[in-house]
Image (tube, rainbow, N blue to C red):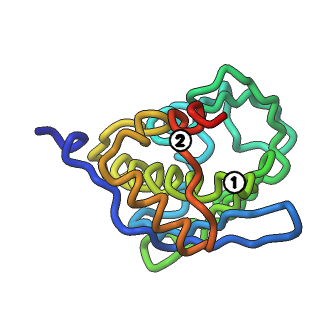
Amino acid sequence: MNDREQYAPGLARGAQVRKNGEKWTLILVRELRHSPEKVWQALIDPVHLREWAPFEADGSLGTVGTTVKLTWMGTAQVLETRVMRADAPKVLEYNDIRWELEPLGSGTRLTLWHNIDRRFISWGAAGWHICFDVLERLLSGDPIGRIVGGEAMKLGGWQRLTSEYAKQFATETPNSPSQAAQKP
C-alpha cells in the first residue's frame, strides 16, 4: 500500500462555528510545521492549490484586486473571484474565505474562516480537515495528492469525521448525496 491508500483522517479538532442568523462561519485552525511564507505560497499559487485545495484557480490569489476564476471540484460552476485582501504572509481574503497566518515558533498557525450553508457545515469542516492533512503532507515533501469531493466521501473516516464535527457544532449530519436522492 502507498501513503495515499494508508491515509485516514484523524479526529475532528480545531474547529468551531460562529452563527449570525442564517449566516454560519466555519473556523478551522491548524498548526503547521512550516513557515508562514511557505504556507502563503501554497494558499496563493494555482500549482500548489491544485495539489491540496477543493478548487482550481486560473491565476494567483496573491494580489489585491486580482480577479481569478475558481472552480470547486465536483462542480462545473466557475466563480469569478476578486482578491479583497492579500497581506503576505498574514491575511488572504476572497469571496467567502479568509485565511490568517500567524508565526508559531518555526511554523504557522493557519486559521480558515469560511461562510458555509449551515446544512453542510459538518461536511465543510470534514472536507477542509482532509485538505489541511493533504496540505501538511505536501509542504513536508511527502505529497499524497488532492482528496476532495466524492473521493473524500469514500474515505473510511469520512462518516466518522462528519459525525464528530456535527456533534461539536450541535448540528445534524447531512444525508449523503445517494441518501438525499432517495428522499421524496
Q: Mark 2 points at which residue?
A: 53
Query: Looking at the image, is 19 positioned above or below residue 92?
Result: below
Q: Which of marks 1 and 2 is in front?
A: 1
Location of residue 46 in the rendering, given as x and y in whole percent from the top left corner = 58, 32
Q: Nearer the viewer, residue 157 or 41?
A: 157
Rendered image quadrant of residue 143: top left
Q: Residue placed farthest to the left in the image?
A: 1
Rendered image quadrant of residue 63: top right
- Label 1 sits on a secondary structure element that is helix
Q: Residue placed farthest to the front in the image?
A: 184
- What is the C-alpha distance between the residues marked 1 and 2? 21 Å
Q: Residue placed farthest to the top in the image?
A: 76
Residue at 71% in and 61% down: 91
Q: Nearer the viewer, residue 8 or 183?
A: 183
Number of labels in the image equals 2
- Amino acid at circle 2: Ala
Location of residue 125 in the rendering, given as x and y in whole percent from the top left corner = 56, 58
Location of residue 113 in the rendering, given as x and y in whole percent from the top left corner = 70, 62
For the N terminus, the quadrant is top left
Rendered image quadrant of residue 90: bottom right
Query: Looking at the image, is 45 positioned above or below residue 36?
Result: above
Query: Looking at the image, is 119 positioned above or below residue 106?
Result: above
Query: Looking at the image, is 181 positioned above or below residue 104?
Result: above
Q: Mark 1 points at which residue?
A: 119
- Label 2 sits on a secondary structure element that is loop
- Amino acid at circle 1: Arg
Of pointers 1 and 2, the one earlier in the residue sequence: 2
Is 154 left or right of 80, judged from the image as shown?
A: left
Is 174 left or right of 59, judged from the image as shown?
A: left
Is 119 left or right of 95, judged from the image as shown?
A: left
